[in-house]
Image (cartoon, grey):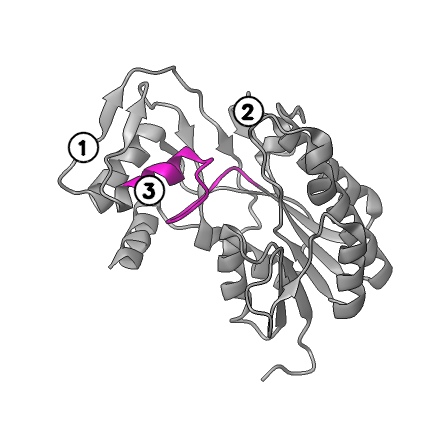
């Protein structure tokens, strides 16, 4: 039973990969968690809102009156989408949430990404230039700037990539994990020396309640263990396909892309330990 100190937390994008794990973490707390879905799943329970529709979003905020908003909704676009098609969900909606939080003294937790810097850098931090390479990155950067300009109490989390079983396929390591779960051997294109520090979805989810409880504000960078792509694929085979080895194919050389994790964030699991968790879900 929730006590009087409990806060109402509205979580957008509730059916998403990160949001499902985050809601599970938040529900361990004392707070009242209110998932907000883009499409209805359970008519007796679900709150549904197309946050890209300003009138719908404003109505939900008015009706729910959350103390905290966790914005995990996004229109992901890596296929040359027009900025106008991404803008309402990825840029305008966070601006509306920020304005609401400014007026109500609420707290906005917003999921952004290293994509606001573009893909050309080897390290990602607040010192990295902001030069997004595509319109998806531009739409996320506009949101970050809107939130900061609003003056609301906010925490912006810039993820480099979030992995796990059944994770979104635009991240190559998720394709490898999901394929391995189906018995398909991962492929390595090129030498795989470029390093990444993708974060496990359950580690990423734990960041949100941490920031809420600490009442944190600012921009935070979130990554996991630093490993080469080749090492990650080898470990995927070792954990999920122990009788197989990675298939090596020719491909371009890739550079490091490391997110410089903010000191304030909780420690993360080792990549191999995350794969052990994925394997348990398959049993």
Near-viewer residue (205 or 265): 205
Identify the image quadrant of residue 112: top right
* Magenta segment: 159-179
Does residue 107 appear anywhere in the picture? yes
Q: At 58% from the left edge and 57% from the top edge, which residue is drawn?
A: 208
| Residue behind mark 2 | 119
Return the x and y of residue 230 as percentages of the image width and height.
30, 29
The disc, 2 or 1, on the residue closer to the chain's N-terminal end is 2
Vertical position of residue 237 compared to residue 9: above or below? above
The disc, 1 or 3, on the residue closer to the chain's N-terminal end is 3
Q: Does the magenta portion include 163?
A: yes
Q: CA distance from mark 2 to mark 1?
A: 29 Å
Q: Is residue 203 left or right of residue 132?
A: left
| Residue behind mark 3 | 177
Q: CA distance from mark 1 to mark 3?
A: 14 Å
Return the x and y of residue 16 as percentages of the image width and height.
53, 52
| Residue behind mark 1 | 245
Q: Is residue 202 left or right of residue 135?
A: left
Identify the image quadrant of residue 65: bottom right
From the image, state whether disc 3 or disc 2 is nearer to you. 3
Identify the image quadrant of residue 138: top right
Does residue 206 appear anywhere in the picture? no
């Amino acid at each position: 039973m929730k006590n009087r100190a409990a806060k109402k937390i509205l979580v957008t994008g509730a059916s998403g990969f990160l949001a499902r794990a985050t809601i599970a973490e938040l529900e361990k707390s004392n707070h009242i968690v209110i998932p907000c879905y883009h499409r209805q799943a359970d008519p007796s329970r679900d709150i549904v809102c197309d946050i890209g529709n300003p009138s719908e979003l404003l109505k939900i905020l008015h009706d729910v009156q959350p103390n905290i908003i966790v914005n995990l909704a996004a229109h992901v676009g890596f296929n040359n989408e027009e900025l106008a098609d991404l803008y309402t969900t990825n840029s305008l909606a966070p601006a509306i949430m920020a304005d609401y939080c400014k007026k109500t003294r609420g707290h906005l937790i917003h999921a952004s990404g290293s994509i606001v810097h573009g893909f050309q850098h080897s390290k990602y931090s607040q010192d990295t230039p902001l030069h997004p390479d595509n319109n998806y990155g531009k739409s996320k950067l506009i949101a970050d700037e809107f939130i900061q300009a609003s003056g609301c109490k906010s925490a912006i989390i810039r993820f480099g990539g979030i992995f796990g079983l059944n994770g979104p396929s635009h991240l190559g390591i998720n394709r490898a994990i999901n394929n391995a779960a189906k018995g398909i051997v991962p492929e390595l294109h090129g030498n795989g020396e470029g390093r990444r520090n993708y974060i496990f979805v359950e580690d990423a989810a734990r960041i949100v309640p941490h920031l809420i409880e600490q009442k944190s504000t600012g921009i935070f960078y979130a990554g996991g263990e630093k490993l080469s792509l080749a090492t990650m694929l080898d470990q995927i085979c070792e954990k999920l396909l122990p009788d197989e080895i990675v298939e090596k194919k020719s491909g371009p050389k890739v550079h490091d892309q490391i997110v410089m994790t903010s000191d304030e964030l909780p420690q993360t699991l080792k990549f191999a330990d995350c794969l052990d968790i994925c394997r348990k879900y398959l049993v």
